[in-house]
Image: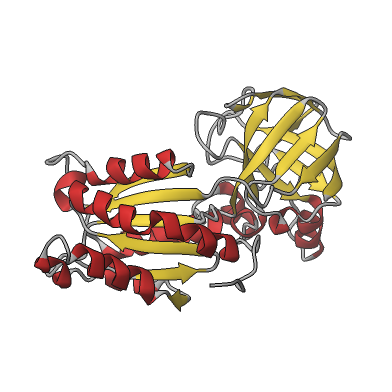
Amino acid sequence: MELRGTIRAVCISPEKGTVKRPVEKGILVKDYGIQSDAHAGKWHRQVSLLSWERVEEFNRKGGGVTDGDFGENLLVEGMNLKSLPVGTLLKTGTAVLRITQIGKECHSDCEIRRRTGDCIMPREGIFAEVLEGGEIRPGDILTAQLPDADRPFRTAVITLSDKGARGERKDESGPAAAQMLADAGYEILETILLPDEPELLKKELCRLADQRQADLVITSGGTGFSPRDRTPEATMAVADRNVPGIAEYIRMRSMEVTKRAMLGRGVSVIRKNTLIINLPGSPKAVRESLGFILDSLDHGLKVLRNSVSECGSV
């Protein structure tokens, strides 16, 4: 299905944290963003987009904002951008963008919030990367092509380690998990190294599930008996539903390798449409654990994505 909208404004800013100003045209640069815009770069939030209708609604309530005030690069009329899933392709002329994130964390000190007391960008804005470059102008038609249901699964890997986060130990478990997933055809969105801080983990899990819409998030570490091992508690705190069978199966198979596997406290849960699985902290245990479950995750992830029915023969 293809949706259509009209670009009302193209905006850029020379510095981050400031409002953007309209320009007559923008140059979209592949793998970078809009030329001369401060937010362009080698990352997943190269171009920001906002629905024109949401800005008009804000102004009807007395907002008094103009094009670019929310920090948006592209203001688009006739398309409910927030409803589009991550992975949607946006096309105009020769340019092709791919949506990478829905919404963002609010920065309370941004210029528009200081001026109006509110900012709709964290709630309504979306972000994209540039797959193909080209010129873009106000009045251009923007089309949206929803992602293929059979696209590769998108995953992120989080390692929990105080020593690793302090640079006192090289993280080998995270790269081991990422490599196995990449070899299995998964798209690796991010690899993250965090200290054993539950609040930091909860924040990242929510962001990856809610904004980046990852199909799968793997965590490594923080599942033992140490007082700092709080990964299962943080994971359960952000969960919508429990999926105990995955963690139970990992423990059962791991006990064939070492009886100490019974001491592992890892959990497996669902948040929105994202499956989150805790793995132990050692590279060996990560490889073993992923090896036990990787072949069987496909069906569950497709069900979460609504690309296959839960019903089937046994």
Q: Nearer the viewer, residue 88 or 291?
A: 291
Q: In the image, residue 129 lies at what x, y percent?
A: 61, 36
- The image shows residue 128, relative to residue 204, as above or below, that is above
Q: In the image, residue 311 lies at what x, y percent?
A: 62, 74
Residue under the point 81% across and 52% down: 79
Residue under the point 60% across and 71% down: 312
- The image shows residue 60, relative to residue 178, as above or below, that is below
Q: Is residue 276 left or right of residue 9?
A: left
- The image shows residue 301, relative to residue 134, as above or below, that is below
Q: Nearer the viewer, residue 62 or 130?
A: 130
Q: In which quarter of the view is residue 83 placed?
A: bottom right
Q: Is residue 65 left or right of residue 4?
A: left
Q: Nearer the viewer, residue 241 or 23?
A: 241
Residue 3 appears in the figure: yes
Residue under the point 19% across and 68% down: 264
Q: Is residue 44 left or right of residue 55?
A: left
Q: In the image, residue 69 lies at what x, y percent?
A: 68, 45
Q: Is residue 300 left or right of residue 205?
A: right
- The image shows residue 265, relative to residue 108, as above or below, that is below
Q: In the image, residue 158 lies at what x, y percent?
A: 33, 51
Pick out the residue farthest to the front: 314
